[in-house]
Image (cartoon, helix red, strand yellow):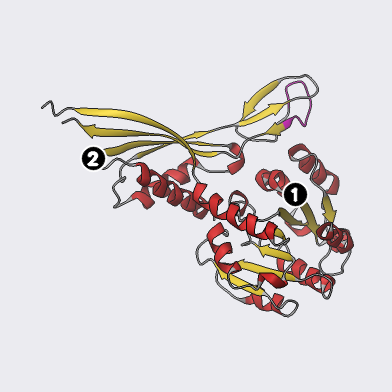
Amino acid sequence: MLLVHEFSIAEALAAQVQRHAPAAGRVAEVEISVGALRGLEPGALQMCWEAVTHGTPIAGSILRVDLRPWSIACSSCGRTWTSPVPFVACACGDAAPVPTAGDELELVALTVDEEEA
Amino acid sequence: MGGGRRTTRVPLSERVLEANDEIAAGTRAELDRRGIFSVDLIGAPGSGKTALLEATLRAVRGRRRPAVLVGDLATRRDGDRLARWCDQVVQISTGQGCHLEANEVRDALGQIDLDGVDLLFIENVGNLICPVGFDLGQAAKVGLFSLTEGDDKAAKHPYLVQAADLLLLNKIDLRPYLSFDRAGFEADVRLLNPAVPVLDVSATTGEGLDAWIAWLDR
C-alpha cells in the first residue's frame, strides 16, 4: 500500500516535470520538498520514479527528495529541535513535547542539461 | 559553434498535486453552491466505515437526503450494503489505487441527481495513509479508528489526526473485552491536534451515534 501511495505521487510529479521539460535538452535532476506529515518514504519514491519515468523523455533523471523533519517543542524547558519522528521525549524529562510538521509536497526546481549551439 | 553543454537550474515552486487540487476546488464550489455538506470518511480496512454509514443512513432516513460515493479496490459489496439504506449510491472501483482522487469523485458525482441531495458521504478506500493527502473537494474529513485496531493508531497516523475535522472511535461496545488505553489514545490525539473532537461510537449497538448525527446536522 505504501508503495502505491508513492506511485501515484510519482506519476503526478512525472506529468508535471514533463510539462516543464524543454524541447531541446534533458532533465538531469528533479528537486522536491516533502513535509514530514506526508509520511513519504524517499526510497520508495525513488523506486516509483524510475518506474514511471521509464521510456519517457525524462527517464534517467535523478529525483532529489528534501524530506522536511518534524519540529519538536518542549513546553517544560522551552527547548525546540527537529526530529524524523513525532513522538519523542525531551532530555529534560518531559515525556510529551509537542510535534508539528507541514504537509507540503512541492516541485522545487529542475536542473536541465542543454547542448550549446 | 561551441558545442558545449550548459546546465541550468530552473526554480519552480509548484505543488505536485496541483491538478488534483484544482479539480477538488471545483467540486467544493459546486457542493457549496448547492448547500450539500460532504464528508470524506477515512479509516483502516475493517474499522467499520461501511457499518457506520449503514447506521448513519438508517438514522437520518426521512429527515436528510443523503448520497454516498464508495471507493473500493475490487468488489461492489460495500455499495450493495449501502444501497439498502440509500437510493443514491455510486461505487467507485479504484482497481490498484489505494485512495480516491478528485477526478474520480467529480466523475462519480455526475451519476447522482444532486438536486435531491443535502448530505454527501465519500467512503474512501480502507487505508489510513494514502487518502489523507488527496483533496476530494469535501467539506470535512472524518477519521475513523476502532478499538480493535489498538490504541497506538492515532500516534502512527499523524497526518490523518492532524487533517481531520472529527475523529470517531468505533466499536466502543467492545471496551470490556479489550485492553485499549483510551486515555493514552486521547493524549496522542491531543499532541497532534488539540482541537479535533473525538466521539466514541458503536455502529453495531448505536451507542454514541446521536452525537455523530448532531455533528452532521450542525
Which stretch is magenta?
A: A90-98
Judging from the image, mark 1 belongs to the subunit labelled: B
Foreground residue, B75 or A25? A25
- Read off the residue under disc 1: B165
- Image-quadrant location for residue A115: top left
Residue A64, given in percent of the width and then of the height, sits at 42, 35
Residue A27, given in percent of the width and then of the height, sits at 31, 38
User: What whole-number distance in Å separates the C-alpha atoms at marks 1 and 2?
Assistant: 47 Å
Q: Residue furthest front?
A: B33
Answer yes or no: is residue B98 visible: no
Judging from the image, mark 2 belongs to the subunit labelled: A
| Residue B115, magenta (yes or no) | no
Q: Secondary structure at mark 2?
A: loop
Q: Secondary structure at mark 1?
A: loop
Q: Is B171 situated left or right of B31 in this image?
A: right
Q: Is B124 situated left or right of A113 in this image?
A: right
Answer yes or no: is residue B154 visible: yes
Question: Which quadrant of the rendered structure holds the C terminus of chain B?
Answer: bottom right
Q: Identify which residue is drawn at 57% across, 38% down.
A: A104
Q: Is B14 located above or below residue B49 in the figure?
A: above
Q: Identify which residue is drawn at 31% across, 34% down.
A: A112
Foreground residue, B49 or B151? B49
What's under tag 2, amino acid-wise? Ala
Q: Residue furthest bottom?
A: B84
- Read off the residue under disc 2: A24
Question: Which quadrant of the rendered structure holds the N terminus of chain B?
Answer: top left
Mark 1 or 2, closer to the camera: 2
Q: Is A43 located above or below residue B36 in the figure?
A: above
Q: Identify which residue is drawn at 70% across, 43% down.
A: B162
What's under tag 1, amino acid-wise? Asp
